[in-house]
Image: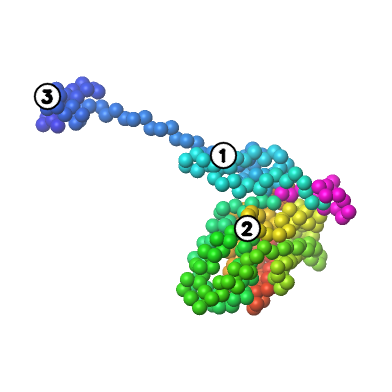
């Protein structure tokens, strides 16, 4: 280095004479350091299909995405699967396009539908919802979990509920996270694993008595396992807000597999009435009902209309589950935000 900045100073871009004589030209402070060109920043891949991107609506990773399905335009969905840092494709969890759809008209041949009834495709459970369920128990104390898991029937029923979202390996890890502090329930492992056998599902769609309320009522009956019976009742005003008729709701439920398995996990059709950003809040409330016995919750949610538009609401949930955990009932009332 120079003892005097004015002595032996080199010209711009070249080391000074003294540094050259000392054999350390690279240490010359007058030398303009050549800066490597920064690599061009890679643009993030668009995570929305073309129709959603043009409408400035958030999209999901599934194909077809939920919005295109509701617009009855699954063939126009152009969203691509995400890539990881190495550039290789993630495991393909997208729902395969359905080439034949169940009939929505009694007596109609398979693969046909009513002219005015849109066709729905089952949507694979997104990774975000899976992670929300896996991490949900971090919100509870050891005391909360201990009281919950000491009721084996209720625990098994609850695990059967989330079996529609989590794989068998996830469920085992989920159970271990709950019972790690209590070894007395380890002996129940075999009977618990037996409760994870594939379940058949049935749906009943109907209307509530005339009311000015925007209300949905959901009942889940596990008393006749291995069949789980889902019931959805809606007020006429709620149908108008969502843009769904009873025929639309039945068609939506028909898209859900009649028997759950461990190969593909599909988002529950009742969740499809909500925008995906609200799924975690709804699922967390359901878990609170089982674990904490929570009966009421007020949640900001976003409803997803049949035409793809969203409605922001404040929802009030009144829920209950029987002591044996075999019957779950919740009533949700919505107040749209202006």
Pick the residue in front: 211 or 233: 233
CB under 8 Å between callouts 3 and 1?
A: no
Question: Which mark is first along the chain, 3 or 2?
Answer: 3
Task: Tell me if I can see residue 162 in this picture.
Answer: yes
Question: Which mark is first along the chain, 2 or 1?
Answer: 1
- Predominant secondary structure, magenta span: loop
Kindly identify the residue that appears in the image at 51 percent across and 40 percent down. Answer: 88
The residue segment tinted magenta is 104-121
Residue 216 lies, in percent from the top left, at 72, 63
What residue is pinned by disc 1? 46
Query: If the image is split into quadrants, where does the N terminus sit?
Result: top left
**Separation of residues labelled 3 and 1 (CA atoms):** 56 Å
What residue is pinned by disc 2? 262
Pick the residue in front: 325 or 249: 325
* Label 1 SS: loop
Query: Is 38 left, or right, of 121 in this rendering?
Result: left
Kindly identify the residue that appears in the image at 14 percent across and 27 percent down. Answer: 23
Mark toward the viewer: 1 or 2: 2
Mark toward the viewer: 2 or 3: 2
What residue is pinned by disc 3? 21
Kindly identify the residue that appears in the image at 65 percent across and 65 percent down. Answer: 197
Residue 193 lies, in percent from the top left, at 59, 68
């Amino acid at each position: 280095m120079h003892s005097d900045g004015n002595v032996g100073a080199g010209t711009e871009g070249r080391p000074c004479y003294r540094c050259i004589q000392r054999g350390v030209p690279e240490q010359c402070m007058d030398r303009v350091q050549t800066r490597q060109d920064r690599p061009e920043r890679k643009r993030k891949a668009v995570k929305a299909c073309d129709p959603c991107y043009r409408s400035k609506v958030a999209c999901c990773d599934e194909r077809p995405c939920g919005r295109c399905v509701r617009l009855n335009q699954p063939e126009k969905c152009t969203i691509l699967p995400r890539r990881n840092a190495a550039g290789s494709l993630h495991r393909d969890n997208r729902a395969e396009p359905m080439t034949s759809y169940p009939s929505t008209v009694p007596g109609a041949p398979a693969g046909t539908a009513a002219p005015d009834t849109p066709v729905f495709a089952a949507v694979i459970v997104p990774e975000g919802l899976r992670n929300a369920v896996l991490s949900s128990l971090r919100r509870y104390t050891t005391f909360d979990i201990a009281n919950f898991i000491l009721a084996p029937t209720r625990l098994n029923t609850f695990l059967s509920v989330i079996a529609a979202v989590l794989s068998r390996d996830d469920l085992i890890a989920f159970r271990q996270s709950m019972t790690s502090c209590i070894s007395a329930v380890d002996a129940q492992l075999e009977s618990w694993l037996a409760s994870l056998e594939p379940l058949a599902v049935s749906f009943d769609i109907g209307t509530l008595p005339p009311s000015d309320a925007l209300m949905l009522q959901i009942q889940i009956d596990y008393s006749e396992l291995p069949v789980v019976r889902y019931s959805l009742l809606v007020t006429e005003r709620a149908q108008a807000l969502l843009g769904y008729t009873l025929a639309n709701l039945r068609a939506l439920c028909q898209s859900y597999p009649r028997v759950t398995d461990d190969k593909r996990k599909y988002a529950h059709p009742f969740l499809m009435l909500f925008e995906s950003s609200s799924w975690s809040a709804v699922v967390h409330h359901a878990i609170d009902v089982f674990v904490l016995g929570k009966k009421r919750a007020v949640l900001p949610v976003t409803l997803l209309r049949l035409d793809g538009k969203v409605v922001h609401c404040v929802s009030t949930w009144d829920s209950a589950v029987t002591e044996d955990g075999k019957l779950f009932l919740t009533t949700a009332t919505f107040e749209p935000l202006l």
